[in-house]
Image (cartoon, helix red, strand yellow):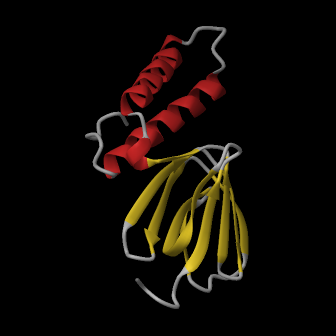
Amino acid sequence: MMTGRTFHLEIVTPKKVLYASEVQSFRVPGYVGSFQILYNHTPLLSLITVGELKIVDADGNDIRFATSGGFVDVKDNTVMLLAETAERADEIDVPRAQVAYDKSKRRLVEKRFETDVERTRLALERARNRLKVASRAGKVPTGSS
């Protein structure tokens, strides 16, 4: 365990606290690109977008989450990420994510008048992200992008 160079991280959704522990680093998907938070990071409040959360825990292990957005608050070596949704990579239901991806893609191709295009694009982006994060964690081969 690395001593003195860790900070406290909490990942919270409206339903529950998903993660709370000391970590070495935390990478989040910002609107203009991902950024990394380390020990003694300057105070920050930022929106995040659909993407991957990557944690290096106090023991040096990589932990990944898929998120659909939210915001992150950094202050005094404490980081709070409030996410609309977040799912640990090793808990992603890959077949369900693939069905959501295929359904959203099909709806965009069909271009039916009742389709809410923006909502469908967002659903496609979230499903693609879940599959990508699961793949990076070794759960599935890439191929749905």
Image position, residue 25 (x, y; %): 49, 74
Residue at the extreme top of the image, as rendered? 113
Image position, residue 54 (x, y; %): 46, 62
The residue depicted at 53 percent of the width and 37 percent of the height is: 126
The residue depicted at 63 percent of the width and 22 percent of the height is: 117
Question: On the picture, is 21 further left or further right than 44?
Answer: left
In this rendered view, identify the residue nearer to me: 66 or 112: 66
Image quarter hosting the N terminus:
bottom left
In this rendered view, identify the residue nearer to me: 88 or 108: 88
Residue at the extreme bottom of the image, as rendered? 4
Vertical side of 136 occupied by 114: above or below: above
In this rendered view, identify the residue nearer to me: 102 or 93: 93
Image position, residue 142 (x, y; %): 29, 40
The residue depicted at 44 percent of the width and 37 percent of the height is: 128
Image position, residue 58 (x, y; %): 45, 77
Image quarter hosting the C terminus:
top left
Vertical side of 112 occupied by 16: above or below: below
Q: Is residue 36 visible?
A: no
Q: Is residue 144 visible?
A: yes
